[in-house]
Image (cartoon, rainbow, N blue to C red):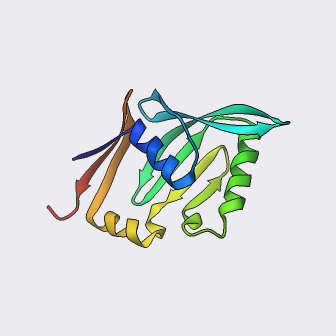
Amino acid sequence: MQFRLTFEEIQQLIQRRAGRSVPIIYGGPHTVRVAYDVNVLFKQASVGIDITVDRINGSDIFLSYSGGAAIEFMLRSALGHIKNQPGANIIEMLDGNRLLLSLGKNPQVAQVFNAVEINDIHFDEQYAMIDFTPKNL
């Protein structure tokens, strides 16, 4: 089975939840390109990052990202900023430009993983697609 979200739907969700516009663009079968505007020396600059779904292990999703020291610094700062917020424990920085999303640490999301197994997360020009198999069929 497959669940699809358009990039526009994801962007609207981010806008509603975070109050930020974050463009998402297709970057390859398992990669999306995300842009984020930051203030640098009193002017606005757009920073882009490629995020790739490397593998899925149960409720853990392993991602890799492109970028150098600036992206690493921004991610560490962002994760440090949210460390005391609800749900912050699901994101962990790993070595080598990688992130781990431990979605099973969220009780509501853990219930989803009790019912389905995620097989793949991939992208095309318009959609983020999650291929899954129900566990009790």
- The quadrant of the rendering that contains the C terminus is bottom left
How many marks do you count on the picture? 0
- Residue 42 on image: x %, y %: 83, 36
Please state if 43 lies on the left or on the right of 89 as rendered. Answer: right
The furthest residue to the right: 41
Residue positioned 41% across, 30% down in the render: 29
Q: Is residue 96 above or below residue 76?
A: above
- Residue 15 vs residue 75, the one in the foreground: 15
Pinpoint residue 118: horizontal percent, then vertical percent: 33, 53
Q: Quadrant of residue 112?
A: bottom left
Q: Which residue is most to the left?
A: 137
Q: In this view, does 84 lie to the left or right of 100?
A: right
- Height in image: 55 above or below 134? above
Measuring 61% from the left and 68% from the top, which residue is drawn there? Answer: 85
Which quarter of the figure has residue 39?
Answer: top right
Q: Which of 31 and 80 is in front in this view?
A: 80
Tell me the residue at 56%/53% (across/down). 18
In percent of width and height, residue 19 lies at 57, 50
Percent across and percent down for residue 98 are 61, 47
Whether residue 39 sits left or right of residue 64 in the image: it is right
